[in-house]
Image: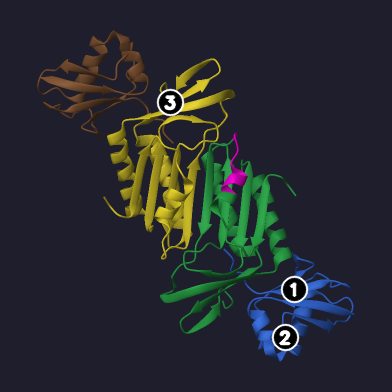
Chain colours: A brown, B blue, C green, D yellow
Amino acid sequence: MEITILTFGILSDLLEKEEFQVQLTPEMNVLNFKQYLLENFSKLNGYSNFSVAINETYASDDTIIKEKDIIALIPPVSGG
Amino acid sequence: MEITILTFGILSDLLEKEEFQVQLTPEMNVLNFKQYLLENFSKLNGYSNFSVAINETYASDDTIIKEKDIIALIPPVSGG
Amino acid sequence: MNERISIKVTSCPLKLEDAYNFVEDPSCGGISVFVGTVRNETQGKKVLRLDFSAYEPMAIKEMEKIAEEALAKFSITKIAIHHAIGILSVTEIPVIIAVASPHRKDAFKACEFAIDTLKETVPIWKKEHFECGEVWVNAHP
Amino acid sequence: MNERISIKVTSCPLKLEDAYNFVEDPSCGGISVFVGTVRNETQGKKVLRLDFSAYEPMAIKEMEKIAEEALAKFSITKIAIHHAIGILSVTEIPVIIAVASPHRKDAFKACEFAIDTLKETVPIWKKEHFECGEVWVNAHP
């Protein structure tokens, strides 16, 4: 299934894009998705210090990614 | 010696004046001064819940009152 | 007076931007402001207005002491303590305290210290006016 | 949205009076305001400006959560959480939080809770610009 990924902060700089699509296997959870990214995007250069939000809400490692989900890669926040 | 007394808050209401003079014996301390007031001003009606400031600074019970001191009777404050 | 301190006792309306502009500083990352406002009720009774009076020269001295103590106790850069006197209606402002510091925790702590101490030591009094009478706040234990 | 909450993420300059006027209420005796300001240095390095970016719809949701949680945890009446994005210079204002409550302790606690939590959870990022380079704040442990 095709999933849209949004990137922010340092991750936009590392990946050199703010949005892209990936093909994921069904029933993939967030932890496996992070591993997939680290293995397939060398530009991340092993940078794993980020959270994942699904549909504008923080997701836990065992959340299953579903078709049409919008995934955001959230590096450590620094607002305020 | 003649001493000027300033009153504030409820004490102005009780004594019905904001300033008056009293004749005090020399070497009187603040504690004795408070007793003097309570004995000589029946309008106070026993109201003893006040502090004494001398020359715009809080005074302790054993502070000696000196000629030309300006004494203020400070009921519990309620600013803010 | 210490140029890091702004003290005011006034019968004019207090303005938030006066205190804020005084403490704002390029070295500071946070500003904590406390604004006291007149409530419409106290202990279940409807308040019409408050009447604040002060022993003004002593009030200013005590407010300066609080500001100096806050500068000594906390890592803060500037502090403003402004108090209004006279008659104030509901939502009007008796007191504004603003504190600027490099790091925010210090500003919060100093601001709370200043308002707590002001309420204990500064010779200012308020009379509450109700529909049926008036009372000096705190006068009776 | 809850009428006791004002949330804003904007590229326009934040105004203290907007947050203040929103929370001011006749039932309240105290208003605690926190204003974040851009400092001229960080860890000994001179800061020229900060560039704030946000995942805006999620930032708004997370700020609403903070406001709802503050209303549930503390005896407060109203809360405003406003954040600016874009480029800000020294002394300009990235964030304003204002909280009104009947009694002041609740306003202080809720205001500090809100800024602490915002800095942990709200998806907003700042890049510090120095004379010789730039860095995403917090990006590296």
Quadrant of res A61? top left
Q: Secondary structure at mark 2?
A: helix
Contact, mark 1 vs mark 2 (Cβ under 8 Å)? no
Q: Amino acid at mark 3?
A: Asn
Is residue C139 placed above or below D125 in the rendered structure?
Answer: below
Give left or right: position of D27 versus A27.
right
Q: Chain of mark 1?
A: B
Please provide percent x and percent y for residue B69.
Answer: 84, 71
Q: Count the marks: how many?
A: 3
Q: Nearer the viewer, residue C8 or B79?
A: C8
Residue that carries the numbered disc 3 in the rendered image: D138
Quadrant of res D23? bottom left
Please provide percent x and percent y for residue C34.
Answer: 52, 54
Do pointers 3 and 1 mark residues of a single chain? Answer: no
Q: Amino acid at mark 2?
A: Leu
Q: Which residues are magenta?
A: C19-27
